[in-house]
Every structure is written in C-alpha cells, then in structure tokens.
C-alpha cells in the first residue's frame, strides 16, 4: 500500500507537465471565486490542498476539514488594485459522534462607487454613480470514511452584480484527503466551482472550474522546529495548467515563516514574439523566466504568522505578500480563531 501511495503521488506531480495547453483567459466568469483567501496559504504559494488543516479548508479542500478537533473560524481582508476590496468569513464545526465536520462560508468582493458615463450624452459623467460586487455563500459537509481517508463537499450560491443588472447561479466543490501513513505524506485532490453556466444580460458564461491535486510532507518535525513542504498542480478551464510550491517553517507552533512560488509556464513572451510565432503564449502570469531572460519574481509569495494561545481560544494572525506583473504587489491579512 505504501508503494502504491508513493507511485500515485509521483504520477499526480507529473500530470501537469504532460498537459500544458493554450491559455483560455477570459473564457469563464465570476473569477472572484479564484481569489486565494488565506494569508497562510498565500504565503505558501497556495500549495495548500495537501495541508488544509484550518477553516480555510472550506475553500481549498473540504476533505481536509476532518483534521479539525475543535471549532475553527477565519476572517480575511484583501485590498486589491483599483479600489476593489475582498472579504471572506468561514466557520467549521466538528461533530465527533458522526466523524464529520460542517461549515459555512461567505465571500464578498466589492468596488467603490464609480461615475457613470455614456458614449454620447455623458462622456464626462451623467451625474449618477454605480458599483459592482460579487457574492458567494455556501455550506460544507465533510465525512471521514476511514481512519486515513476523508471526503468533503460544498454547495455555493453565486451572485454577480453590475449596476442594476445581476446574474445568479450555484456551484459545487468536492475534495478528498488521504494520509498515506508513510513518513507523514499526504495526497489530496479537489474539483472546485463546477456547475451550470451563469447568464448575465443574455450572455451566458461558464464557472471558473478547476481540478487540483497535490500533497504535503512534514520534512522536519522535531520540537521546537517544524517544516512542511507542499506541492499542488491545477488544471483550470480558463487558463494554463499551474504548479504551486510552498514551504512553512514553524517555531514552537507560535511563530511561522513561509515562502512559495506559482509557476504556469517556463517563459513569458513579448507581444512581438507572439505575433511572429503564435505557438508562443504571452498570457503566462507566473513564469520561471521573464521577458528579459531573468528569473521571474512574479508569483513569488512570502508570509509570516503569529499564534497566541489564550485562556479560552487560540488567536492566529497571518500576513502574506505577493507580486503580480502589471498589478504590482498585494498584501493579504487573515485572522483565525479556534476554541
């Protein structure tokens, strides 16, 4: 069984390399569902599907929620470019008698008020303003099937608004979590955001569905030090396949440092190179090499965390920083509470 588990993990790690495809950017809607919502996970480059040991598993892998032994909650705020704000709240509650965990989550993305303009009558403004927003609210159930294997699923209500128009729909997540029992190796898989198309003003569009697989291992675990190494590969329906790599170092389960890198292509090409050879893809967000032949820092993530064990609760404060080409840097803050 252990040999089979190792072989399976190696196969999962090789799959993306066998199926690099052309970018399909802009072919799916409600892409706010793809925004990473945990500063801890983001600090590890979002290589989190095989870790998923706190309430953020509601988003990353509902199958991992069975690691929780007590209620856990997470609050996240992200300040994004162009006056866009992202908020998330999630809560998970173990039910020991059923070997299960239930949870709920709400995601809300919103903009500041914008001036309404029209091409003919009001190119400088009509005197009215409007906003845009996205909302997702869902419930989750996760069940332990054996001592080492668990599965979880979520159903989410989706709403997208722009001024007076809106689209509504439903999406589903399913995740699995398998502890191989060999040298703390974890294997995990998930399919997120699958469901029927949404229709916005008679213009249907698909959900940003994603198939993810990966794992983690405790490379070093002798108190007061702990090191987790994690890997994740993903196959989205609206972009190139992507690798996420992450490391978390913990000291006395109190202070944490994290580093990660996202990779979805070897080299980012310039537009003139793309025009000369359409086999090259200019949409690579997180290359290994940038347009100038240098090592790219796009997709590089850094993070830190402090955990405080108070008399009745544990308080977790996490921060992450990442750099994105053309958009600049972004900061993530998460607050975690367990009882």
Image: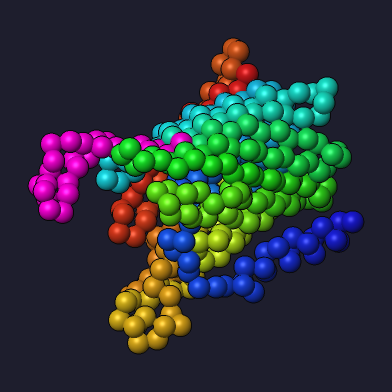
Q: Residue at x 63, y 18 (%)?
A: 339
Residue 25 in the image: state x and y as whole percent: 44, 63
Q: Residue at x 49, y 40 (%)?
A: 168
Point out the stretch of residues depicted in magenta. 109-135
Is there any visible trace of residue 48 in the rendered image?
Answer: no
Residue 317 in the image: state x and y as whole percent: 48, 30
Is there any visible trace of residue 96 in the rendered image?
Answer: yes
Q: Residue at x 69, y 40 (%)?
A: 153
Residue 40 in the image: state x and y as whole percent: 52, 40
Q: Quick one: 81 or 237, which is closer to the camera?
A: 237
Residue 331 found in image quarter: top left
**Horizontal arrangement in the rendering, residue 126 relative to residue 300 (left or right):** left
Is residue 266 depicted above or below 314 in this figure?
below
**Horizontal arrangement in the rendering, residue 283 relative to residue 252 (left or right):** left
Q: Is residue 119 magenta?
A: yes
Q: How is the image coloured?
A: rainbow
Q: Residue furthest top?
A: 311
Q: Quick one: 26 or 326, which is closer to the camera?
A: 26
Residue 212 found in image quarter: bottom right
Q: Quick one: 123 or 41, which is closer to the camera?
A: 123
Q: Residue at x 73, y 65 (%)?
A: 10
Q: Residue furthest right?
A: 1
Quarter in which the N terminus is drawn: bottom right
Q: Is residue 333 magenta?
A: no
């Amino acid at each position: 069984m252990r040999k089979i588990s190792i072989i399976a993990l190696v196969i999962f790690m090789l799959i993306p390399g066998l199926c690099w495809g052309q970018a399909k950017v802009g072919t799916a809607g409600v892409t706010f569902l793809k925004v990473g919502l945990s500063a801890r996970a983001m600090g590890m480059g979002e290589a989190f599907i095989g870790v998923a040991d706190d309430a953020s598993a509601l988003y990353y892998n509902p199958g991992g929620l069975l690691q929780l032994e007590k209620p856990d909650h997470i609050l996240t705020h992200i300040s994004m470019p162009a006056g866009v704000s992202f908020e998330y709240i999630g809560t998970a509650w173990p039910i020991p008698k059923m070997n299960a965990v239930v949870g709920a989550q709400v995601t809300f993305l919103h903009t500041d008020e914008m001036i309404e303009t029209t091409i003919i009558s009001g190119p400088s403004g009509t005197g009215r303003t409007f906003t845009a927003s996205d909302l997702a609210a869902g419930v989750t159930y996760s069940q332990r099937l054996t001592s080492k294997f668990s599965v979880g699923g979520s159903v989410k209500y989706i709403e997208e608004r722009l001024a007076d128009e809106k689209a509504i729909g439903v999406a589903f997540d399913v995740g699995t979590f398998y502890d191989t029992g060999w040298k703390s190796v974890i294997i995990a898989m998930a399919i997120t955001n699958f469901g029927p198309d949404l229709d916005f003003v008679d213009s249907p569009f698909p959900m940003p569905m994603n198939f993810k697989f990966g794992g983690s291992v405790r490379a070093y675990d002798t108190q007061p030090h702990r090191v987790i190494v994690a890997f994740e590969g993903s196959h989205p329906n609206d972009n190139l396949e992507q690798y996420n790599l992450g490391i978390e170092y913990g000291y006395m389960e109190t202070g944490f440092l994290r580093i990660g890198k996202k990779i979805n292509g070897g080299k980012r090409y310039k537009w003139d190179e793309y025009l000369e050879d359409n086999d090259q893809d200019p949409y690579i967000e997180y290359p290994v090499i940038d347009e100038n032949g240098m090592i790219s820092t796009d997709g590089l993530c850094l993070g830190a965390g402090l955990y405080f064990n108070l008399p009745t609760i544990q308080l977790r404060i996490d921060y992450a920083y990442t750099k994105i080409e053309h958009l600049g840097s972004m900061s993530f803050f998460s607050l975690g509470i367990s009882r």
